[in-house]
Amino acid sequence: MQNIHSQPEALAALKTRLEALDRAGGRRAGAGVRAGSDDAFAPLATGVLHDLYAAAPADAVAVNAFGLGLALRAAGGRPIVWGLHEMMAQEAGRPHGPGLHEMGLSPRDLLLVRTRDVQTLLAVGEEALRSPAVGAVLLSAWGEAKAFSLTASRRLTLAAETGGAPLFLARAGALPCPSAAETRWSVASCASEPLEGGAPGRPSFSATLLRRRGGGATGTWIMEWDREQRTFRPPAPLSGGLVPLAAQRPTAASGTAGRRAA
Amino acid sequence: MAAVDPAAAQAGLTPGLALADARARTPALRVVAHRPDLDDALLGRVLEDFGRFTPMIAQDPPHGLMLDVTGCAHLFGGETGLMRTVQARAERAGLKIRCALAGTPQVARALARFGPGGRFEPGQDRAAARRLPVAALELSDKEDEALRCLGLKRLGDLDDRPRAPLAARFGADFPTRLARVLGDEDMRITPHRPAAPVIVDRVFFEPISAPEDVERVLSDLLVETMDRLDQTGLGGRVFKAAFYRVDGETRRVVVRTGRPTRDAPATLRLFRERMAVLAAPLDPGFGFDQMRMSVPWTQVLAPTQQGLERETPGEEAFSRLIDRLTARLGPEAVLRFEPFASHIPERAARLVPAAARHGDETWPDLDPDDPPLRPLQMFDPPQPVETLAEVPDGYPLKFRWRRVLHEVTRAEGPERISGEWWRAPGQRTRDYYRVEDRDGRRFWLFRQGLYGETPEPRWFIHGLFA
């Protein structure tokens, strides 16, 4: 057998491959809500799978909206694919174009794929994740299903790694179960900061981080969707109130820490 | 009796004879009820199957088919070979046929129906048509009789005469009819299926049935199709594969693309996905003996530099994803939103198949201070709720939906939306309220009708806010 050192090309090729493996591994380790950081409002890692569960069946629309918000933030202007289980549409209503638009999402950049069963839904997710054009994928499913296995979530994770886009798997009417997800959240609707005249305010969520890969702090955050900035933020009285928005920001940041500690 | 077979014809029976008379003449008669619908269905199947010989094929009633074989005969060993193949195929299906091949469809029809049939070289067919009886003109019985009384028995007799007196006697269209049957005037057939701009065929010496063989041929066909498209600077939007089975069944598989393409491997992938989800799987039976790829819809596609950009992220890759998903799930499952000019909430947006190209539609501008005023998810139809209101005109304090009681803590409204009276009169006015319950969930409720109206107004839930 020949010594590998006598084949410089082969050695170089091997080194390149090892480096590539290292890079992939490095990204995975640093993924998720950054380990050690308590900033739950930072964008979630891309190229991985995030599980979102509705805290109660009635929170289905909240978990979908939370997923859409995360997807919108991760997509960075690229198209979003929303795979929708037919059962979810029956239970929580069909997606409404103007409603999506009012979430701050351009309906033009959204591809809605309706599937009858979970098996197809997961296949759609995999196909969409492998496409380099997709910015983020959201899959919404209703109820428990055998198809949500550990194997399925590993396949999805692999597909997400290939394409580089994140996958948000929103489920309602189901209990959290083990998966290869980077983070796992439980999402509920939350009373909004009222507007003038006691009118209901912006979309508000109570999001609990149940688990993150590689450990790290978990907790519950109250989040409000900011349509203009396309981001989640701690709830704050809206502009038009007494305090201008700019002056509000430092207070809001310290408010987060307080609420988290509570 | 509607029709007789050759044996019965030899026994002296003719169509139009009463059944009792026929029984009296030939007691051993076997009678089958006449079912014109089944005849038509059979003819339809034969038409599909004979599509293998040429794409230009049409029904020629009664009980006839017309094939325009211009430029097709060489595939089947020349015109004689083609006729022999057609005969053999029909006989295998249990049909008795008479073929004629001539310069124009009308001459061929007349020669097949009123003459001996067979192949007629260019130049011969006029002479052959002149020997046909005048019945070949297919006039009414009265006119036939009149011609015979005049001693004009053959088309040649008519052809030798000046046309003007004939037109005066038998009507203005008589000379035209004569000219057509004699082949002086050529009337093209209207094919059953419009011929596609690009058609590529494979006829097999031995029928094939193994899925991998079928796929290899499909791949070959696609490569050749794309080459042809490339030469003309076109790209295909619809690709249709036809599989002709030995026993006469024909299956067609169609894939569509969101933009014109000449990419054979990508199109093959679409076919693979389409064929994987067919409701009735592609059954080769005893094998396919011919396959055809046609491109009914083409669009201009500028030539692209191959190989320089291997990865093409962006719009093109996205459109490929849409194609793949559409091929697998069908166009009704892969959708995009499109705004629609209506103030009725459920009509304000439509879902359209994403594969159809979308225009640059615009959505209304939003006030940055407003929260979402339309729900993210909507029930269609709206679901009824029971309510308890403080004042008849106000928002409900409590409402029961899906057997759960919700206590309203915050509300905004009403937003009054009237029906579209120009579409359907009698639609009732709706007063919409955005409400939030004690658990922090937001709903979109409306009251249909106004207080004091009959029938009583009713409450519905129309959607859910995030």
Image (spheres, rainbow, N blue to C red):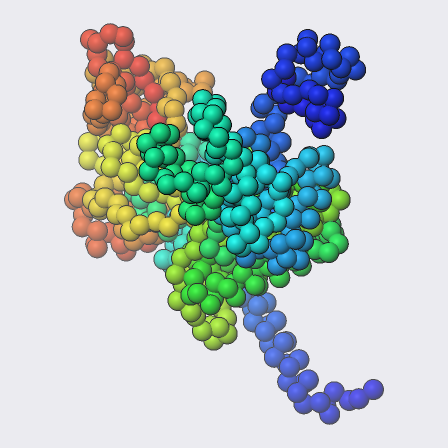
Horizontal side of B311 relative to A195 (left or right) equals: right
Residue B260 visible to an observer of this rendering: yes
Tell me where residue A170 appears, x and y as whole percent. Answer: 50, 42
Horizontal side of A226 relative to B391 (left or right) equals: right
Which of the two residues, B53 or B105, is positioned nearer the viewer here?
B105
- Residue B463 image-quadrant placement: top left
Total label count? 0
Quadrant showing the N terminus of chain B: top right
Tell me where residue B2 appears, x and y as whole percent. Answer: 61, 20
Residue B331 visible to an observer of this rendering: no
The relative height of residue B357 versus residue B21 in the rendered view (above or below) is below
Tell me where residue A204 appears, x and y as whole percent. Answer: 36, 40
Which residue reaches farthest right? A1
Which of the two residues, B89 or A36, is positioned nearer the viewer here?
B89
Tell me the residue at 21%/9% (across/down).
B453
Tell me where residue B332 appears, x and y as whole percent. Answer: 46, 39
Tell me the residue at 74%/21% (across/down).
B11
The relative height of residue B54 versus residue B21 in the rendered view (above or below) is below
Quadrant showing the C terminus of chain B: top left
Horizontal side of B9 relative to B407 (left or right) equals: right
Which residue reaches farthest front? B151
Tell me the residue at 57%/35% (across/down).
B114
Which residue reaches farthest bottom? A6
Which of the two residues, A80 or B357, is positioned nearer the viewer here?
B357
Which of the two residues, B125 or B103, is positioned nearer the viewer here?
B125
Tell me the residue at 70%/24% (across/down).
B9
Horizontal side of A29 relative to B449 (left or right) equals: right
